[in-house]
Amino acid sequence: MTRALANVVDGEKLDHLSDEIKATFTERIYNAREEVIRAHWETGKLMTEFLKSNSHVKMTALVQLLADRGAGKERTLYHCSKFYKTFPRYSDTDKLGFGKNLSWNKIKAYIDPPDEKTPERRVVSFEVSKEVWDAVRMENPREGEKISIEALDATVEILIKDV
C-alpha cells in the first residue's frame, strides 16, 4: 500500500515535506532544551542575588532550605548556582561550542567534572529486595535493560518515604 501511494505522490513534494517535519522537530527540541538551560541559569541568578542581599546566609544552607520547600533537589540547585557563577552572562554558554546540541547534562558535566578520585562512574553490584526491584522494573520495563544508579536511588528514596 505504501509503495503504491509513493508512486502517486510527487517525490519532490514528499521530500520537501519530510525535510520540513525534520526541521520542525529539530527546532522545537532545541527550543525546549534552551528553555530548560535558561531556567537553570535564571535559578542560579536568583539564588546568587538572594545571597548578595542576605550575606549571613551561605549557599549550602540556602540550597537545603530551598530543597526543603520544594524548589528543587539539592544537587540541581547546587548545579544551578555553579552554572550561574561559571557563566554570569548567559550568552557565554555559546563559547562551549555545542551549538544546538547543548543540553543541561553537558553543562553539568562542564561545570562539575568528575574529580581525579572518581574519574568515571563505576558499576556497583548489590542485592536489593524484591519490592525495590519491582518498583525499578516498573520505571524501566524493558527486559534486560540496565538500570541507572539514579533510577534506583530515586525509587529507593520514594519507597523509603512511603514507609
Image: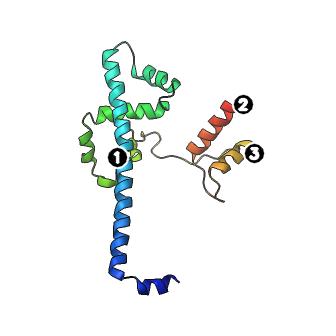
Residue matched to label 2? 163
Q: Secondary structure at mark 2?
A: loop
Q: Quadrant of residue 83?
A: top left
For the residues labelled 1 and 2, the Cα–Cα distance comes to: 38 Å
User: Coloured how?
Assistant: rainbow
- The residue lying at 48 percent from left, 87 percent from top is 4
Position in image of residue 90 (x %, y %) = 27, 39
Q: CA distance from mark 3 to mark 1?
A: 40 Å
Disc count in the image?
3
Figure check: 54 above or below 137: above
| Precedes in sequence: disc 1 or disc 2 | 1
Q: Is residue 102 above or below residue 75?
A: below
Q: Earlier in the sequence, mark 3 or mark 2?
A: 3
What's the amino acid at mark 2?
Val
Mark toward the start of the polypeptide (3 vs 1): 1
Q: Residue at x 39, y 41 (%)?
A: 108
Q: CA distance from mark 3 to mark 2?
A: 15 Å
Circle 3/circle 1 CB separation < 8 Å: no
Secondary element at image label 1: helix
- Residue drawn at x 28%, y 36% as measured from the top left: 87
The numbered mark at residue 34 is 1
Q: Residue furthest front?
A: 8
Please say if the residues under marks 1 and 2 sit with CB atoms less than 8 Å apart.
no
Q: Quadrant of residue 89?
A: top left
Residue 79 shown left or right of residue 148 in the figure: left
Which amino acid type corresponds to the residue marked 1 in the rendered image?
Answer: Glu
Q: Position of residue 100 (x, y in %)?
A: 32, 54
Label of residue 130 in the image? 3
Which-is-in-front pick, marks 3 and 2? 2
Check the image and name the residue furthest to the right: 130
